[in-house]
């Protein structure tokens, strides 16, 4: 495992996952409900920024690695799944939306692993719609974690709208990846 700044940032993102979840379990004397929301929002936002920054830095410094390429999407999926679990418990996201997002991640991860095993990984490389989906999630989730209005701005309403957009993009990107992989799938299942 190459120890470089991009990989350390990815590990830092993974280490922030228990912080996003853990703030909701500290005693009320330590942190008010609003304080919990703010802390979780800050931790998640920092983690989301490292998601963008570690990839950019790896390319800029020429420190890309197979391990980093493996760990980065794992960190992303863990971070989103943990945040959705918290939001489900707080009743700030619909269970069907969380299932769509997490179910897609599991399905596409399995598809990518299978495609890599048969030597066709490039056909399911990250797409633009996949990046849009991730962006919508990374904006919606902090809004839903923060929850309370800021003057006339209602983060919960905007976050809810964006998480629905993310769910639509999630289904769209899953269909896109499955369509790209379909020639390989149909060739292998007909043997």
Image (cartoon, grey):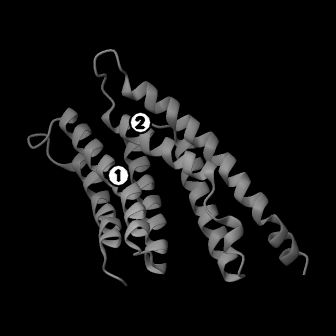
* Residue name at image x 32 percent, y 49 percent: 44
Farthest left residue in view: 29
Farthest bottom residue in view: 1
Q: Residues within 10 Å of mark 1 (few under 14, many from 20)?
A: some
Element type where label 1 sits in the image: helix
Q: Quadrant of the N terminus?
A: bottom left
Q: Is residue 107 above or below residue 176?
A: below
Residue 141 location, quadrant: top left
Q: Position of residue 185 (x, y in %)?
A: 81, 70
* Residue name at image x 68 percent, y 65 percent: 124
Horizontally, residue 86 falls left or right of residue 176, namely left
Q: Position of residue 156 (x, y in %)?
A: 40, 28
Q: Quadrant of the C terminus?
A: bottom right
* Residue name at image x 43 percent, y 40 percent: 139
Give the spatial CA distance, label 1 vs label 2.
25 Å
Q: Which residue is mark 1?
A: 49
Q: Residues within 10 Å of mark 2 (few under 14, many from 20)?
A: few
* Residue name at image x 40 percent, y 69 percent: 58
Q: Position of residue 126 (x, y in %)?
A: 60, 60
Residue 90 visible in the current orientation = no
Q: What number is the disc on residue 91?
A: 2
Which of the two labelled residues, at mark 1 and mark 2, occupies the earlier sequence position?
1
Horizontally, residue 163 falls left or right of residue 39, namely right
Instruction: Give the tally of numbered discs.
Output: 2
Q: Position of residue 104 (x, y in %)?
A: 61, 55
Q: Is residue 40 above or below residue 126?
A: above
Residue 105 location, quadrant: bottom right
Horizontally, residue 190 falls left or right of residue 101, namely right
């Amino acid at each position: 495992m190459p120890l470089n700044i991009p990989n350390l940032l990815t590990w830092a993102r993974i280490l922030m996952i228990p912080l996003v979840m853990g703030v909701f379990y500290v005693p009320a004397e330590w942190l008010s409900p609003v304080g919990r929301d703010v802390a979780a929002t800050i931790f998640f936002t920092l983690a989301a920024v490292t998601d963008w920054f570690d990839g950019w830095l790896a390319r800029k410094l020429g420190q890309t690695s197979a391990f980093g390429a493996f760990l980065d999407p794992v960190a992303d999926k863990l971070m989103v799944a943990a945040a959705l679990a918290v939001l489900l418990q707080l009743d700030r996201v619909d269970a069907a939306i969380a299932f769509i997002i997490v179910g897609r991640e599991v399905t596409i991860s399995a598809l990518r692993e299978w495609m890599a095993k048969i030597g066709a990984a490039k056909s399911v490389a990250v797409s633009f719609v996949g990046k849009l989906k991730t962006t919508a999630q990374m904006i919606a989730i902090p809004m839903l974690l923060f929850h309370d209005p800021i003057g006339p701005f209602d983060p919960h309403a905007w976050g809810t709208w964006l998480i629905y957009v993310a769910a639509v993009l999630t289904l769209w990107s899953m269909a896109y990846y499955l369509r790209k992989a379909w020639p390989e799938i149909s060739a292998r299942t007909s043997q």
